[in-house]
Image (cartoon, helix red, strand yellow):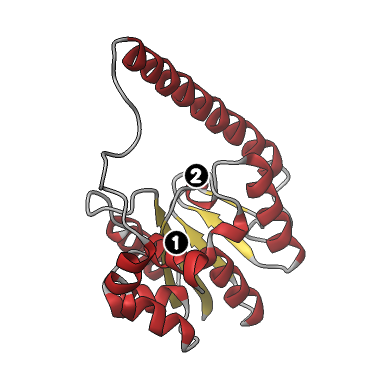
């Protein structure tokens, strides 16, 4: 039986979004197409982040390559990243390591059914990636425009006085997180054990470890 790994991502770290739907849809695809799902990776982080800032994605790719997984299942191209250079770099890495990626929404994969490379993949990713970058620039422009208008009307930016926690307060609040990280626990496992978001663990690790 062919082996597969599922990678699912949402940008929000709050309870408003979760990866459940992506996992359900990809699991159904795997069952229908004769894949044995070996592992599921989920991540709550912006797709605009660089690879080194997305530990779960890096862990997922390493796992797939090390364990010679046949196919990495992802719900859509934007889940892999919104920066076209990062996406293409990941695709090239997987292509060189003979790891297939299947994007469910686009019904697109690195390798075709006969094992040959998909000749349209790079073109498709470049076009979609460029559109995604343009949309991000549009969002940034609208945010900056709204911020400027807010300031002109007397608004003040920044956190309210006293709302920023001191280092000691953070150490107390995230004592378990710090302890687990110092013991060598992964960011993902630490988040699960401590009941906090992955991004919170990443922030605490960067600040205290």
Q: In this view, does 191 lie above or below 23?
A: below
The residue under label 2 is 78
Q: Nearer the viewer, residue 18 or 53?
A: 53
The residue under label 1 is 203
Measured in 3D between alpha carbons, the distance from the residue under mark 1 to the one under mark 2, in whole angstroms, is: 24 Å
- Seen at 22% across and 54% down, the residue is 15
Query: What secondary structure is found at the residue carrying circle 2?
Result: helix
Residue 184 place in picture, x, y as percent: 50, 86
- Seen at 26% across and 39% down, the residue is 160
Q: In this view, does 188 lie above or below 45?
A: below
Q: In this view, does 97 lie above or below 161?
A: below
Other-residue count near label 2 (Cα within 10 Å), few / some / many at <14 / 14–19 / ≥20: many
Residue 154 lies left or right of residue 102; in this view the side is: left
Q: What count of labels does the image hold? A: 2
Residue 183 lies left or right of residue 32; in this view the side is: right
Residue 32 lies left or right of residue 54; in this view the side is: left
Upstream in sequence: badge 1 or badge 2: 2
- Seen at 40% across and 15% down, the residue is 148
Q: In this view, does 162 lie above or below 134?
A: below
* Image quadrant assignment for residue 84: top right
Q: Nearer the viewer, mark 1 or mark 2?
A: 1
Other-residue count near label 1 (Cα within 10 Å), few / some / many at <14 / 14–19 / ≥20: few
- Seen at 29% across and 77% down, the residue is 194
Residue 136 place in picture, x, y as percent: 50, 30
Residue positioned most to the bottom: 183
Residue 91 place in picture, x, y as percent: 67, 54
Residue positioned most to the left: 15
Residue 67 lies left or right of residue 118; in this view the side is: left
Query: What secondary structure is found at the residue carrying circle 1?
Result: helix
* Image quadrant assignment for residue 99: bottom right
Residue 69 place in picture, x, y as percent: 59, 76
């Amino acid at each position: 039986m062919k082996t597969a790994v599922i990678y699912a991502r949402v940008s929000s770290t709050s309870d408003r979004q979760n990866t459940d739907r992506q996992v359900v849809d990809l699991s159904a695809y795997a069952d229908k197409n004769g894949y044995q799902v070996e592992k599921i990776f989920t991540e709550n982080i912006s797709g605009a982040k660089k690879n080194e800032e997305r530990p779960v994605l890096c862990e997922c790719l390493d796992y797939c390559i090390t364990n010679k997984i046949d196919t990495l299942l992802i719900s859509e191209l934007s889940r892999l990243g919104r920066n076209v250079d990062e996406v293409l770099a990941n695709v090239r890495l997987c292509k060189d390591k003979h790891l297939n990626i299947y994007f469910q929404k686009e019904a697109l994969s690195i390798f075709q059914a006969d094992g040959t490379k998909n000749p349209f993949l790079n073109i498709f990713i470049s076009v979609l990636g460029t559109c995604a970058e343009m949309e991000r620039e549009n969002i940034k422009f609208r945010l900056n425009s709204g911020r400027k208008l807010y300031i002109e009307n007397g608004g003040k930016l920044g956190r309210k006085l006293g709302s920023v926690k001191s280092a000691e307060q953070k150490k107390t609040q995230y004592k378990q997180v710090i302890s687990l990280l110092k013991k060598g626990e992964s960011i993902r496992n630490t988040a699960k054990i401590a009941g906090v978001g992955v991004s919170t663990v990443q922030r605490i690790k960067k600040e205290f470890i």
